[in-house]
């Protein structure tokens, strides 16, 4: 066992032992262990096989920054073993193996690497026959492609989304981020501090620092009520206007911050030499994480390769953990020993200057020895601390520019003054003192922008590095296996070959070689690649640059992006009434609505009876799902004039007018009616499916135009009842109230406010069914009482509630459209025959310019009615094609059997030349039959509209 005693192991709980399996073998662990640390404690260092050559791979960063530690869980592939906690009875398997992890049959590919040069896949798989790709090569590649297995039968997880708003968002809770967050919060700002680790502190939790500093910062942060600390939270991108997605477990926080401080730290870089990918070779920070976080001894005999003081600190940590440090190799030439170096000397650790690791060799899939200065040194652990790069991804997404200092061999980031700033090592603030100062400085600058008073002495200067930084040279090994990118198994020679093939630009090198395209996204390869390209093309690293950093920064599940996958349900206030009437309920979007009422034994008869009740007597429909928006303010009419195609500014009070909404490209997106309640108030309806978009568009344009108008969404607050049919007036007149429903007092396309059956209502006289109709809107809490009163008053007149299918046929008989069914993404008013609904006098409305431009291009189709002969056998379905000759020119959008007419009727797009009343068009049925159908250029039922105006 490699487990160290307390106080090592700050993350593990030794009182809670666990058991789990890896590759079918049982292992011990403690609560708080990650998969990699628990395996390492038992001596299992090999975790996976590499992508291309199937070479053994293990822990390198202990931070989930590369593909080496990706493993398979029962229900999830590509899980980072060095970040995923162990749970009881967890079953873990290796990925990308053929056979077993220890005996991978595909490891033989490593011996044939010379025949698989970079980009070979672009030149291979072309023959010997024309169909060889589909018949031979593609099946082979598909069997080998992909990492891990997706379990399509895995239990569903609950994903959620939430919103966060703050004055200052600090990303990264290391020394810089903690100090920045505390300074901002102590000055009164509302602060959110997030970090992907399970605790705050960053390097303070595993580095060689005084624990009292972290304890003090933790106590101060916990005492601030205006500082929200979110651990285990990944900031996965930066978007315009400081919109940042924070992922905590299975929840996505959509975060908007006035100021952002990025304290994302730096990324340790590998050294490049032969066999630098063997398990047992890892970053110095990984060693420290294993020791201090998990209480794991990372090896027995260690060699430390360092080009800075951090490596000496790692060597001391190894000594204290009981590891024999065989040698500290420092590529820098001799100088005055620092305090850490002197302490190592005092402990008898050998230090050799001006040497580096030239190669490594393994035994049994693990490091066995390294060559330094021409001699081999036996070891099972090589720790590397030869440099780091700023974690540039978020910074570059926020607009930072990448630079390079040739003297120090370090990557730099420059960010213009604005609402985003950098702090800590990502900003070049070196050492602990520099990180603390950088965090406080960033907080002070953010506070100044927010208008908070800031003490002059808090704006600190940058701390300069105290010692020179060594630039590790990159030399191609004649025998290869000197890996630049562990994810893609790319060697130095692969990049040289790509450059020789003419790929000189870094973005082209990336795409040809796939360098930086794996899970690490260039974290360990970007700088080395830039240096290799620069040297090979006689340019500076700054001229070459690095590839574009795009979101997401880290892995994210599709479930997190999707959010809730439970079916959302909405029910109107009349839902219980429908169930009591034996309604067959169906979902329409999120709403449950009655499809028809009565016995399901004869559905068609029930629907026909409902239709005939409306045509011959009176029917009642629940229209509560309609969008309901109230506009208030002196500019309400002007606002509607700009948003809709008809004129509303001059609309008389008490009148109702049709509304047609277009988008910027002139396509129809919604329709409804606008009832003018007063000079400064309108009540506007929208379709059920589009109300959310209409409301959002209204808010958007209101913010753009800055008119004096307020928009209120009343969709859930109000219910609607449509009383329709020749006897509708008689039913309403039988109810108590103060509204006169006579033809003279309440003409067609008028609206009234008052009381009906003791319920306050807004009533509009409109005609979706083509019959005398009154639409009553009232507060949702009072809707059941109004429904009961109308049902009781209508009983002597044979009133019958009707459902969606009857409503669909009734509107189809009148040729009325449904948005989204009879329209598509490019439908114009002219294609619908709605030229009458577009004002020719208004100077502007949304989409006006576009429909004028599109009209000049000519019209290719038009929506018309089609009436099939009574008793016709071949009846098409919706979406069946309309042909002109042999070419499709349109499709059926709505179709149904009309009991009123005794035949099937449809709405369809046809060629504009065939849209004249009486023309005959060809429709292809689903059974392949071609039928000729006459065009009806008017409403199928009551084309003069006499019935709805009675």
Image (tube, helix red, strand yellow):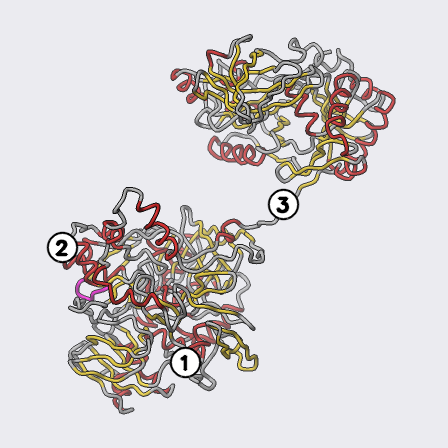
Q: Is 635 or 214 nearer to us in this picture?
A: 214
Q: Is 180 or 568 nearer to us in this picture?
A: 568
User: Outermost residue, right direction?
Assistant: 796
Mark 2 against mark 1, which lies toward the viewer? 1
Query: Does the magenta portion include 31?
Result: no
Per the rendering, the mark at residue 43 is: 1
Main secondary structure type of the part rendered in magenta: loop
Position of residue 156 in the picture relative to residue 141 (left or right): right
User: Which badge, 3 or 2, is on the more N-terminal residue?
Assistant: 2
Where 234 sits versus 750, above or below?
below
Residue occupying the point 26% across, 81% down: 369
User: Outermost residue, front direction?
Assistant: 129
Position of residue 913 in the picture relative to residue 391 (left or right): right
Position of residue 570 in the picture relative to residue 701 (left or right): right
- For the N terminus, the image quarter is bottom left
Residue bearing mark 2: 537
Residue bearing mark 3: 568
- For the C terminus, the image quarter is top right
The x, y position of residue 84, in whole percent, is 47, 67
What are the residue bounds of the magenta stretch?
A: 406-411
Query: Would you call the spot at circle 1 few (<14 residues within 10 Å), some (14-19), or many (20 or more)?
Result: some
The x, y position of residue 666, in whole percent, is 46, 24
Mark 3 against mark 1, which lies toward the viewer? 1
The x, y position of residue 420, in whole percent, is 37, 53
User: Which badge, 2 or 1, is on the more N-terminal residue?
Assistant: 1
Residue occupying the point 65% across, 8% down: 944
Query: Alpha-carbon distance for marks 3 and 2?
Result: 58 Å
Residue occupying the point 38% across, 62% down: 263
Query: Would you call the spot at circle 3 few (<14 residues within 10 Å), some (14-19), or many (20 or more)?
Result: few
Q: Secondary structure at mark 1?
A: loop
Q: Is 255 or 832 nearer to us in this picture?
A: 832
């Amino acid at each position: 066992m490699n487990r160290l005693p307390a106080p090592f192991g700050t993350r593990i709980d030794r009182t809670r032992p666990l058991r789990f399996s890896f590759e079918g073998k049982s292992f011990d662990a403690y609560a708080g262990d990650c998969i990699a640390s628990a395996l390492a404690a038992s001596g299992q260092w090999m975790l996976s096989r590499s992508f291309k050559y199937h070479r053994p791979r293990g822990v390198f960063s202990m931070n989930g920054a590369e593909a080496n530690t990706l493993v398979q869980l029962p229900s999830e592939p590509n899980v980072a073993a060095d970040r995923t906690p162990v749970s009881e009875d967890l079953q873990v398997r290796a990925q990308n193996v053929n056979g077993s992890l220890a005996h991978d049959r595909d490891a033989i590919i490593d011996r044939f690497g010379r025949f698989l040069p970079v980009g070979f896949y672009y030149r291979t798989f072309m023959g010997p026959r024309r169909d060889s790709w589909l018949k031979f090569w593609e099946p082979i590649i598909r069997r080998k492609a992909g990492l891990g297995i997706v379990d399509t039968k895995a239990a569903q997880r609950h994903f959620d989304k939430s919103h966060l708003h703050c004055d200052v968002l600090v990303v990264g809770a290391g020394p810089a981020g903690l100090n920045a967050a505390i300074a901002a919060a102590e000055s009164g700002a509302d602060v959110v501090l997030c970090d992907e680790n399970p605790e705050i502190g960053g390097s303070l939790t595993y580095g060689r620092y005084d624990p009292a500093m972290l304890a003090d910062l933790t106590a101060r942060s916990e005492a601030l009520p205006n500082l929200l600390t979110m651990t285990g939270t990944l900031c996965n991108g930066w978007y315009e206007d400081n919109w940042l997605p924070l992922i905590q477990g299975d929840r996505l926080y959509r975060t908007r911050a006035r100021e952002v401080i990025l304290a994302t730290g730096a990324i340790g870089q590998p050294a490049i030499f032969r066999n630098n990918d063997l398990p047992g070779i890892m970053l110095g920070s990984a060693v420290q994480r294993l020791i201090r976080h998990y209480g794991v001894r990372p090896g027995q005999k260690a060699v430390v390769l360092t080009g800075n003081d951090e490596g000496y600190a790692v060597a001391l940590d190894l000594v204290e953990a009981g590891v024999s440090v065989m040698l500290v190799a420092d590529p820098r030439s001799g100088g005055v020993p620092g305090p850490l170096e002197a302490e190592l000397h005092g402990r008898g650790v050998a230090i050799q200057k001006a040497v580096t690791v030239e190669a490594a060799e393994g035994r049994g899939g693990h490091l066995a020895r390294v060559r330094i200065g021409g001699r081999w040194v036996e070891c099972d652990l090589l720790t590397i601390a030869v440099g780091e790069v700023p974690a540039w991804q978020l910074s570059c997404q926020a607009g930072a520019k990448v630079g390079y200092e040739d003297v120090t061999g370090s990557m730099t980031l420059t960010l213009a003054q604005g609402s985003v700033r950098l702090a800590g090592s990502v900003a070049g603030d070196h050492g602990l003192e520099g990180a603390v100062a950088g965090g406080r400085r960033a907080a002070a600058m953010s506070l100044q922008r927010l208008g908070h008073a800031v003490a002059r002495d808090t704006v600190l200067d940058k701390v300069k590095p105290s010692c020179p930084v060594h630039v590790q040279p990159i030399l191609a090994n004649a025998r290869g296996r000197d890996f630049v990118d562990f994810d893609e198994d790319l060697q130095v020679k692969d990049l040289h070959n790509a450059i020789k093939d003419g790929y000189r630009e870094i973005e082209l090198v990336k795409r040809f070689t796939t360098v930086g395209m794996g899970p690490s996204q260039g974290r360990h390869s970007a700088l080395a690649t830039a240096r290799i390209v620069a040297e090979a093309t006689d340019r500076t690293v700054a001229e070459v640059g690095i590839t574009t950093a795009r979101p997401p920064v880290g892995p994210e599940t599709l479930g997190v992006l999707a959010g809730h996958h439970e079916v959302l349900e909405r029910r109107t206030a009349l839902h219980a009434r429908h169930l009591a009437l034996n309604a067959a309920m169906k979902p329409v979007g999120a709403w449950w609505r009655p499809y028809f009422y009565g016995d399901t034994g004869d559905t068609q008869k029930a629907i026909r009876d409902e239709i005939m009740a409306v045509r011959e007597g009176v029917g009642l429909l629940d229209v509560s799902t309609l969008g309901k928006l109230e506009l208030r303010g002196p500019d309400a009419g002007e606002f509607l004039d700009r948003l809709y195609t008809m004129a509303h500014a001059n609309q008389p009070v008490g009148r109702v007018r049709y509304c047609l909404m277009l988008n910027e490209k002139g396509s129809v997106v919604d329709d409804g009616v606008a009832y003018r309640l007063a000079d400064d108030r309108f009540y506007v309806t929208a379709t059920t499916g589009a109300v959310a978009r209409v409301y959002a568009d209204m808010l958007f344009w209101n913010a753009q135009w800055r008119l004096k108008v307020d928009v209120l969404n009343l969709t859930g607050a109000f219910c609607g009842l449509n009383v329709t049919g020749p006897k509708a007036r008689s039913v309403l007149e039988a109810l108590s109230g103060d509204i006169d429903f006579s033809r003279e007092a309440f003409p067609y396309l008028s609206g009234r406010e008052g009381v009906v059956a003791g319920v306050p209502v807004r009533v509009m006289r409109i005609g979706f069914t083509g019959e005398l109709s009154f639409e009553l809107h009232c507060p949702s809490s009072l809707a059941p009482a109004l429904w009961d009163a109308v049902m009781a008053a209508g009983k002597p007149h044979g009133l019958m509630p009707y459902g969606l299918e009857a409503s669909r046929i009734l509107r189809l008989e009148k040729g009325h459209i449904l948005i989204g069914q009879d329209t598509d993404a490019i439908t114009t008013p002219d294609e619908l025959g709605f030229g009458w609904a577009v004002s020719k006098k208004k100077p502007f409305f949304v989409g006006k310019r576009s429909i004028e431009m599109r009209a000049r291009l000519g019209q290719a189709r038009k929506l018309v009615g089609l009436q099939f002969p009574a008793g016709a056998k071949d009846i098409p379905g919706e979406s069946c094609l309309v042909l002109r000759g042999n070419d499709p020119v349109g499709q059926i959008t709505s179709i149904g059997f009309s009991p009123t007419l005794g035949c099937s009727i449809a709405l369809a797009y046809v060629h504009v030349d065939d849209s004249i009343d009486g023309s005959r068009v060809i429709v292809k049925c689903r059974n392949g039959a071609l039928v000729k159908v006459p065009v009806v250029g008017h409403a199928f039922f009551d084309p003069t509209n006499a019935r709805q105006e009675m």
